[in-house]
Amino acid sequence: MSPKSRLYTLVKAWKNKPFQEVQDACGAPWLGISSQALEEHQSWSKRQAISHEPIFNCKGTKLTGSLFRPLLGANDIQLLRLFMEGLDTISYWYRSGRFIPGILPMPSNAIASSGYIDALSDLILNSRLPVGLIALGISEIPEPEIADAYKDGLLRMRRLGVLLHFMNFSGSTEQLHWASEMQMEGLHIDMRQFREQAVSKSLFSQIKQSPYSPTQIYASNIGLVKDLENISALPINHCYGSLMMSPLSRHQMLQINDSRIAKAIFSLHPHPHLNQNGDK
């Protein structure tokens, strides 16, 4: 390695090194760092959290979206702040020239609450994001007592151009009915259930039959090479999980285009070649 390349490596490492606050013995900030600067630094640190799980097409050759994981386990106090953070990240990607759709999961009680829906509507309108970049993740079918309010909340989101995704889809009759009635754009099937034969292959043909044909199927929790082999034989449009790529920060998401692991694994399997006449 030449001296110039070593210098470049050192400068690059120093530039990318996160800022470390210097404090004196009593804990007060040193070097004249203001409280506003510290707040900005803390805000920057939060934005670098490893929170976004990349979603790829079924061959791992194209980044097709992102799942904002902190909202999966958020409590009521955190929901709006995290939803705002998710919208801010999608806006950050959009301003950087990347159209990366973001899935923001929300619990049933929030969707059935007019107060939450009012707040979510204001945040979405203020984000000024184009239609197709925001998707609402639905975790379950609502209880009968809140079903009407739940449906109203989803319809209000739909009128704002928000896409609807069913996150824990197992193929029950009730779930299929909801997917059809609400015309959901995405159904997420856990591949661990497929391994345990809790989800049958016939479910995929049911989903792809009219009126489900526009619906995109997502395979989640891809953790084994066998999962990739299974999805290659099924009508699955998108997949994500630890084998595809681990969660990243929002800045790291801008740097990726494909899942190299999935591409490498798929490249091990021979593909049919066409002759000059177009026949196999």
Image (cartoon, rainbow, N blue to C red):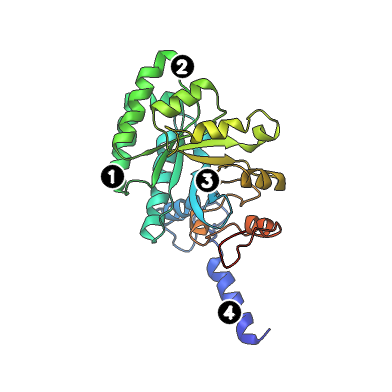
Q: Which mark is residue 143?
A: 2
Q: CA distance from mark 1 to mark 3?
A: 31 Å
Q: Residues within 10 Å of mark 1 (few under 14, many from 20)?
A: few
Does 144 sit left or right of 196 as displayed? left
Tell me which label, 2 or 1, sits earlier in the chain.
Answer: 1
Residue 214 image point, x, y percent? 42, 39
| Image quarter hosting the N terminus | bottom right
Tell me which label, 3 or 4, sits earlier in the chain.
Answer: 4
**Residue 113: in sight, yes or no?**
no
Identify the secondary structure beneath mark 4. Answer: helix
Tell me which label, 4 or 2, sits earlier in the chain.
Answer: 4
Per the image, the residue denoted by label 3 is 237
Residue 119 image point, x, y percent? 32, 33
Q: CA distance from mark 4 to mark 1?
A: 42 Å
Q: Which mark is residue 126?
A: 1
At a point 70% along the width and 56% down the height, the residue shown is: 269
Q: Nearer the viewer, mark 3 or mark 4?
A: 3
Front residue of this view, candidates 108 and 80? 108
Tell me which label, 2 or 3, sits earlier in the chain.
Answer: 2
Front residue of this view, candidates 75 and 156? 156
Q: Which mark is residue 8?
A: 4
Residue 146 image point, x, y percent? 40, 17
Q: Residues within 10 Å of mark 4 (few under 14, many from 20)?
A: few
Q: CA distance from mark 4 to mark 2?
A: 59 Å
Q: Which quadrant would residue 148 be assigned to in this image?
A: top left
